[in-house]
Image (spheres, rainbow, N blue to C red):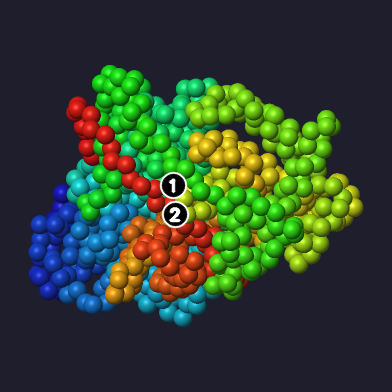
Amino acid sequence: MTFVKRLRGLIVTASLVFSIVVSVKGRGEDLGVVRRGDSVVLRSLADLDLEGQVLTLQRSSDLESWAELGRFRSRLEPYALGFLPDSQDAFFRLITRRLLSSDDWANQLLLPRDSLIARADGSGGLGAAPFVKFTIELQEPERVFFQDSSKYPFHFTFIRERLAGYENLDFNTFEALALRAEGQALVLGSVILAPDPSIAELAIQFSGQEPFDVGDVVQWFHTVAGRLSVRGDSWRFFYMPTFEQRDVTFANETVFREQGVVVDTPARWTSEPVCYAEGWALGRLVFVPAAEIDAAYGDGRLQSRDVLVTETVPAEIPIVAGVISLQPTTPNSHVAILARSFNVPFVFASGTGLQAQIDEWNGDEVLLTVSNTQEGCALGIQNVNGLLSDEEREQILATKAPPAIEIHAKREAGQLWFSTDELGREHVGLVGGKAANFGVLRRSIPENSPESLAFSFDLWDAFMNQSEVTELTLQEWIQEQLSSHRGFPIDIASLRGTLASIRDRIKNRAHFDPATQALIIEALRGFEPGAKIRFRSSTNVEDSEQFVGAGLYDSFSGCLRDDLDADLTGPSHCDSSKSKERGVFRAIRKVYASFYNENAYLERLRHGIDEDRVAMGVLVHHSFPDERELANGVATLEIRKHPGEEDSISATLVTQWGADSVTNPDTEFLPEVVLISGGAMVLESRSSLVPLDETVLNWDGEYRALMELLLRAAQEYESTFQTKSRLLLDFEYKKMAAIGLVVKQIRAIPQPPQVPPPTIESRVTKF
């Protein structure tokens, strides 16, 4: 090791392959240097009192002209220089000066306490993850600019104000240089720390409007990781792709792993259980992989009285006693809404200890309790295996028997369709709950809800009363097929085959007669023939104050021009990628067939609903194409009335980027959750599909605009139920290109009476 002697105002070199001169201006001290292999590493300066100082590393080939290689704040940890040219006449120096207000960036991040990091706002959840933004100029690819992310929450502003040559940068040029692969000159990204400071983990993200080359991402990852100075050897680094990088990343996960890059999602940092639906369940604990749930329910491995445990929750699950997920999902998914409606507990069980306990008890009878408290989600699992007699078990389960549902019975409308502008709650028995509720949106927010119509139950009756090959009408044939499938629980395997046969006949063998087809075409004349039209289920046994029925039935798109072109050959006029025609009659038949979906029929059985009193209507409006969908979400709005005082209003807005569905989510990617109460707005957790300096909707203007729309719709809905002291509503919304915010559904969330859990003497495990 060679040390540079202390000199004033002079530069002296030592006889090394890379000669280094280090002087500390204003201190009169020279600092030691060591060499390792092909890299020159400056000795850690952590033991020196350099708080309030900026350290600048410079390089020269002639000891006269100096170029800046890196700038650091307060301390320089080991910093590899192996990327520099292997030249005999390379000289380096390190100088310091006083820290200025403009020193709001550095080329090295000191973790976990660097002041450049934007800290949590106290809201908790994944929104509490500390982060710092960075930029790489590809003309100098080994230098990473970490910005003060509290002062500069956006890359664009930082680059304009702090990076040389970009003073006059406009936003369109910025997007071209930074967010697209072709002609890229800048790499943008974030370093994210785990929300729990006791977890020594961080993630690196890269921002772009399109996928980047895998090899480039690997190189950028290692470059950024090499500029992160962490204390201790236990830190784990992950690559967590943003939405645009997601598909290509997970498709090449093996390539990343071989290059030393571990891919993951923010779900690994959800450290507390999450209650999606409160309640309790007594049943056998049964683990079934998500991909096998449907098959397991059909062959009896999973039954209606079981508590389902699965690694992730798919868009649809059968009716069971309770649901435990080992990965988080979205709080307003169809499964979560259904669980709340059915009084079925649904919880995300977090933590390796709890998940290990659940695995150990697989197959045992347990009492599951799920409730929200001021401290958070309270999850209790009690192993009661062998503690109950058959009689005791039946007595306990009888207390949870579903309440009777009062429905608006099907009745004749005298016409095949209505404009939804004229619909209200009194029309549920004519067009179904979803279509009737849509009238609330059309009256209250007509500019932010699509023009639409509803086909009445008269169209359903006309379709069902057609004669089949036999003398039976379609409805009579269906009743005959289902005559042996009554009561609940039921033989699922046998029922499943019958329902599949019924759906097939409705979709593929039954048809509208020519006169009815002409009436349907006439009703749809106001729609653009070459644009997709959405046909949505609307029964009188869903979207009521007692029963939601979310996800029980299906919606489909159809193309009017496909039915007007006088032929049966494709491709579809509305989508050339579809080789066959996809007309509107086909779409309506498929909606009708979903009336006999398995869960839909089971729910009617479970609640003892007379099949003769129910029917399927159809809500119709233009489709919302995925490629134009900028965001989608679900909101829960609660209004509580207090005599003599102002109403208290609160809302939870769950929003996801693009067309990645919130109601049928990919559970690997968490949505954004915004809480609103008393006018205050809190970002509870961030979407894992957008960079950490952004929100899914524009903050906070679009969220406040959305809240205003929801309140206007709620007031219209509330006018029908003025005597209620509490109104709890569920909304679905989208943000569409060139249109903006659109609200596409409103319904009440049932509030079934809470039955307290039984007391069974044994050990209780609480988390």
Q: Which residue is the site of mark 1?
A: 341
Please name the residue shown 17% across and 75% down the image.
98
Q: What residue type is labelled 2?
A: Ile
| Residue 680 relative to residue 624: left or right | left
| Residue 346 relative to residue 719: left or right | left
Which of the two residues, 56 or 508, is positioned nearer the viewer here?
508
Dot 1 falls on a residue whose secondary structure is: helix
Q: Can residue 126 be seen in this view?
A: yes
Please name the residue shown 54% across and 68% down the image.
741
In the rendered image, which quarter is residue 99 located in? bottom left
Please name the residue shown 15% across and 58% down the image.
45
Q: Earlier in the sequence, mark 2 or mark 1?
A: 1
| Residue 348 relative to residue 603: left or right | left
Please name the residue shown 33% across and 59% down the image.
684
Q: Residue 305 carries which label?
A: none
Q: How far from the left and from the top, in percent, is residue 482?
A: 65, 30
Quadrant position of the C terminus in the picture: top left
